[in-house]
Amino acid sequence: MPSKPLSVVSLKPDLRSAKGTRIQRGLPTKFLRILTLISLDIIALILAWKLAVFCGTPLESPWTQRTSFLLLIVIVEIGMIAITGLYRAGFHRRNYPSLLKTVSLSAVFLLLIAFLYEPNYYVSRSTFIIFWFLSIAFVFTDRFLFNVVTKLLRKRGAICYPVVLITDVEDQEGHIRLIEQENCYTIQGIADSSCLDRSNRDETFEYLRNHGIVEVFVSWNVIKNRLYVCWNFHTAGITLRILPSQNDVRHPKSVFWMIGNVPCLTIPAPIIAGSDFWVKRSFDLCCSIILLLILSPVYLAIALLIKLDSPGKIFFKQERIGLHCKKFKMWKFRTMVANAEKLQAGLEAKNEIKDGVLFKLKDDPRITRLGKFLRRYSLDELPQLFNVLLGEMSLVGPRPLPVRDVEKFQTPHFIRQEVLPGITGLWQVSGRSNIDNFEDAVKLDITYIENWSLWLDVEILLKTFWAVLQKTGAY
């Protein structure tokens, strides 16, 4: 595959950052559905309790006389139903066996609370049994009526989610039938896999935003080699549903969902798109400012030692390729002789990276005596905190590479340029300089992009600290 020339798109944000703050598509409808179900269940439980007290054997008890105890009963029952996920859409709210189990368990839990609180004053056994039976019957009834009314409204075209189907031509008919079984979607568009290609992606998401699409169904065969595209749906606030194939591989951010009787994978949209990325950016800014203040004496000491060790500048600023192939100057403490870049051409034949994309040489003759020490403990990377402060880098992300390396990229490699580069990353904590094949490094970068979370960043930072102390793979 031929190399692809560099292009600069300065206005595009990090892949994980939303293009403007927006809430999850279809969220008001979902909240209304949940609120309606909770209201119906509260009415059902209050009615069940009142009838149980009226029909059961009378017994003087604060449970039958005080409103606060009725409130406790409702909170416990509703809380247990919510915890077990029975307010979720689709199959979950119609899962009557699970509902029976949850309501029964709630009644037993209330009995335990009553015994521990005031064992001599609860309610009669007949009242408890009547309440247990009526609470199940009434909750089942309100769920059944809710589903009947919902189906009638959807047959008339109301409260249906506008969706788009992206699948191969030969699978379209079967996937359309599968989506229509659920009877809650309106298919507003059908497209093939080419709409997710890099050249068409912006146009596709512009269409989804302009037409108010809430969910997108994508076949696994279409997206299996484009898993990083999931971030585009995530930051657009659009729920992604991955339709099954014969050989499914579960994506780490996915959850199982039933379409009719067929299980498929769903990657849900966040309530506020891009919020987790801006937490990451705030974390980067705070940490870089604090570290710069704490490490300022170390900076001064290293600067003095560099001046005493060899002639040349204290800082080495090299042009690197960052987010969306935009060039920037990356700061490092100088660890090589002053004319190191000019000498590299004569050392290319000794490059230890097998495919030649990166340049790595273990016993590089250009490195100064102090430079070897700085590199061993990664102290030469400390000035990159200024790049983090300027928004050119992050604490964690794929390492920014020199122009020479990126010019040798093949098309699949450019996915690593879709996110903000970092001082450290999954590549560095998985072997650092010991990785001698660029394809292996790219696989680690893609793994980071697909699985990214705030906790993963924290985990990589902790592993980086340990790797530096152990001098693992550093040279």
Image (cartoon, rainbow, N blue to C red):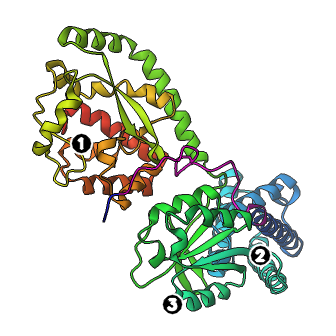
Drawn side of residue 204 relative to residue 350, left or right: right
The amino acid on which the numbered mark 2 sits, given as a three-letter code, is: Val
The amino acid on which the numbered mark 1 sits, given as a three-letter code, is: Arg
Instruction: Measure how far apart labels 1 and 3 are at the Cα level.
Output: 45 Å
Residue 111 in view of the camera: no
Q: Mark 1 falls on what kind of element?
A: helix
The residue under the point 83% across, 86% down is 152
Packing grade of label 1 (10 A; few <14, some 14-19, many >=20) is many
Q: Are marks 2 and 1 in contact (CB under 8 Å)?
A: no
Label of residue 329 in the image: none
Q: Nearer the viewer, residue 420 or 206?
A: 206
Above or below, 136 against 431 in this view is below
Instruction: Measure how far apart labels 3 and 2 are at the Cα level.
Output: 44 Å
Packing grade of label 2 (10 A; few <14, some 14-19, many >=20) is many
Quarter of the picture containing the C terminus is: top left
The residue under the point 73% across, 64% down is 210
- Percent across and percent down for residue 275 are 61, 46
Q: Mark 3 falls on what kind of element?
A: helix
Residue 157 in view of the camera: yes
- Percent across and percent down for residue 187 are 69, 80
Q: Quadrant of residue 98?
A: bottom right
Q: Is residue 176 magenta?
A: no
Per the rendered image, the range of residues in magenta is 4-29
Which residue corresponds to mark 2? 139
Which residue corresponds to mark 1? 432
Instruction: Measure how far apart labels 2 and 1 are at the Cα level.
Output: 58 Å
Which residue corresponds to mark 3? 170
Q: Is residue 14 magenta?
A: yes
The residue under the point 41% across, 85% down is 246
